[in-house]
Amino acid sequence: MSKKQTINNMSYAEAIAELTKISEYLEREDIDLDTAVQEFERGNELISYLKEYLKNTENKVENIKIDLASK
Amino acid sequence: MNNDELFVPVYTVTELNSVLNQTLQVAYPEIALEGEVANFKINQNKWVFFDLKDDNCIISCFMSIYQLKTPIEDGMMLKVYCTAKITNWGKFSLTIRTYELSGEGSVKKAFELLKEKLSKEGLFQGDRKRALPEFVNKIALITSTGAAAYNDFLTILGKRWSGVQIDHINVQVQGADAPTQIRLAIEHFNSLKTNYDCLVLIRGGGSPEDLQAFQTEEVVRALYSSNIPTVVGIGHEDDVCLAELVADVRAATPTDAARIVVPDKIDFMDYLDRLGYGFYQNIKGKIQHGRSSIDRFEHLSRMFLIDRINILENKSSIINERMTKIINNEQARLDIIGTKLEILNPSFLLKRGFSIVRSGSKIIRSTDDLKIGQNVVIQLQKGKMVARIKEFL
């Protein structure tokens, strides 16, 4: 599995998608231990990133003004 | 002519019509009127005519078909906002700007009619409903800033999840202008290039009149046409509004809408912990498996060697046994030979009392080898002697 974008640039949807792939990959019997360990480490990094993101990132509200006169 | 009469200008018919209409416009720029609908009809699919009446009087009303937002039927109570005029044909008529159903009976009736019509068109079918994405990044929110629903939704959203972008358009959620404002907001969000994951339309509970905007064809069609998946949450316990029926997802309340669009970060962090633990167990298992493969190999190798050693040991003990047997046999043979030899040993004879007679070195076995007067040596067990042959017996 080739390495992807830097974790810090990821949206959490992207991070979660990669985490799911890693989870499926590690379930396989036919992978070599070296690759498995690499993916395991990547998975842990993603998990830490997601937890930090959830703890610290605020939601952002923006009010949009439009012309609401009857059309 | 009576000189006591006041001067009254003499108008033409057109002039009078114009003066009266101007007077009406100035005196009554906007009229609100409530009455019962009668004689409802639509002409040429363009013009809507009906009367509003009460127990004593009746007034004609007129509007264009584009203003017919909710179905109207004779017998319904209507509240209209209008201007008054006298038509060129001398008819006193109200031109309707906007209207609302009033009274529970009217509202229910309109609801049933519209629901049937839209249902026949397939707007409420389940198989057209779209699923929301599991994780949303951008939400289009339509509600009134003054409503509790707005604050409730944002508060719960903030507690549950992080990093969401919420774009909000403030609209009226009740009253005559509400349906159009809601429609314009939905259309605006759909016109933007932003990739909204869902469009949320919410308000708190209220009377059927308060919720009327969510029963209008205008709002229902706008939701139906939305390319962005829609969530409608109205905080009421009663029958479902048409807007809720057409939405992709119906939320019971604005708070429930927040729970639907985002997961709970606490639950999700639990899930991440379990996932991480699962990864760890998985890797540990793989390493164990690797180790045990090596162990197994080592064990098998050892068993193989032990086996070989056992075989060799067996063979060597067999060899030992056989050698021992052979040696014992030989020993036995040697013993027999030894015994025989012992018997044949002259000393053995001498012990038994026999003697050996020699003449010189020759052992005499027969008297033929002797002469009278010859000297012989006689060896006994103990000692020797010389003897002379005296006679043969």
Image (spheres, grey):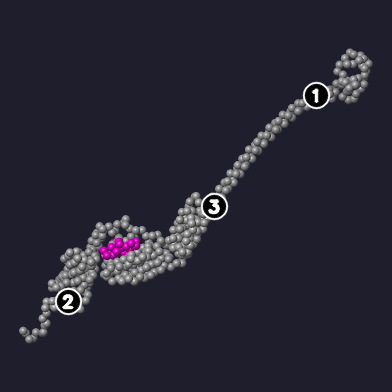
Instruction: Say if mark 3 contacts mark 1, CB within 8 Å.
Output: no
Give the residue number, with chain letter if any, for mark 3: B287
Q: Earlier in the sequence, mark 2 or mark 1?
A: 2
Spatial CA distance of label 3 from label 1 is 82 Å
- Element type at mark 3: helix
In the depicted structure, whether residue B2 falls above or below residue A62: below
Q: Is residue A50 left or right of residue B58?
A: right
Magenta region, residue range: B217-239
Rendering coords of residue B327 (x, y %): 72, 31
Give the residue number, with chain letter if any, for mark 2: B21
Rendering coords of residue B129 (x, y %): 33, 58
Rendering coords of residue B121 (x, y %): 26, 58
Tell me the number on the disc at residue B343: 1
Q: Is residue B94 left or right of residue B372?
A: left
**Residue at 30% across, 61% down:** B224
The subunit carrying tag 3 is B
In the depicted structure, whether residue B289 falls above or below residue B156: above
Residue kind at label 2, given as amino acid type: Asn
Residue kind at label 3, given as amino acid type: Ile
- Mark 3 nearby-residue class (10 Å; few <14, some 14–19, many ≥20): some
Rendering coords of residue B262 (x, y %): 40, 62
Query: Which image quarter is the N terminus of chain B in?
Result: bottom left
User: Looking at the image, which is closer to me, B353 or B275?
Assistant: B275
Q: Is residue B122 left or right of residue B17?
A: right
Q: Are marks 2 and 3 on the same chain?
A: yes
Q: Is residue B20 left or right of residue B121?
A: left
Q: Earlier in the sequence, mark 2 or mark 3?
A: 2
The subunit carrying tag 1 is B
